């Protein structure tokens, strides 16, 4: 898939959560193009089009990034920090999807530049509903910066 088509980048190391997010988004927004990455290092290479992700069609960023905090190799907060500190990527909306309710994690995410923080529900139906709402909002309601 060329990056020109990408709408949502999902950075999630839990295969079950990633599958549920993708299935829910595809079911309710069939036109949406998704990519899933499982660790912070791979995510940064993808976002900054380096390494195996460097290609001629890699200039357009995703419309939104769904980011887990607990990632292998490079933690989610570090990924967020790099995205928000770079002139080319700082305007990309980043939604933190975490299982943590801790005020410390929520505060750090917002201080680092998160556009939203959503706690992953344990209940399947509630999880699906939240993902639906997020996808609808960020792709259909929110106005993207030019």
Image (spheres, helix red, strand yellow):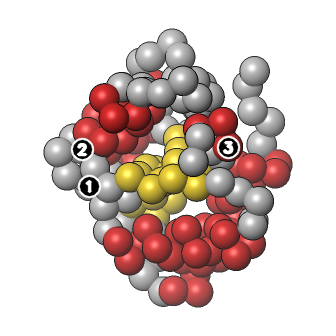
Q: Nearer the viewer, mark 1 or mark 3?
A: 3
The label number, if any, that marks residue 136 in the structure image? none
| Mark before the other along the chain sequence, 2 or 1 | 1
Q: Give the image location of residue 80, x and y in percent.
A: 39, 35
Say which residue appears at 62% left-offset and 74% top-offset: 24
Q: Please, is residue 28 above or below residue 96 in the view? A: below
| Mark before the other along the chain sequence, 1 or 3 | 3
Say which residue appears at 59% left-offset and 38% top-offset: 3
Q: Quadrant of residue 40?
A: top left
According to the picture, the residue beneath numbered tag 1 turns out to be 70
| Mark before the other along the chain sequence, 3 or 2 | 3
Q: Secondary structure at mark 1?
A: loop
According to the picture, the residue beneath numbered tag 2 turns out to be 75
Query: Camera-side residue: 38 or 128?
Result: 38
Tags 2 and 1 touching, CB below 8 Å:
yes
- Answer left or right for 138 relative to 39: right
Q: Please, is residue 138 above or below residue 77 in the view? A: below
């Amino acid at each position: 898939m060329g990056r020109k088509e990408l709408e949502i980048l999902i950075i999630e190391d839990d295969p079950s959560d990633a599958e549920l997010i993708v299935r829910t988004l595809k079911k309710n927004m069939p036109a949406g193009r998704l990519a899933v990455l499982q660790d912070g290092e791979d995510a940064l290479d993808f976002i900054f089009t380096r390494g195996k992700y460097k290609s001629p069609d890699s200039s357009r960023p995703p419309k939104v990034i769904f980011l887990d905090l607990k990632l292998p190799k490079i933690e989610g907060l570090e990924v967020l920090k790099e995205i928000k500190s770079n002139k080319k990527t700082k305007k990309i909306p980043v939604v933190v999807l975490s299982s943590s309710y801790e005020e410390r994690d929520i505060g750090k995410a917002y201080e680092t530049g998160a556009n939203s923080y959503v706690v992953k529900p344990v209940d399947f139906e509630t999880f699906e509903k939240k993902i639906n709402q997020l996808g609808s909002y960020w792709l259909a309601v929110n106005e993207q910066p030019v």
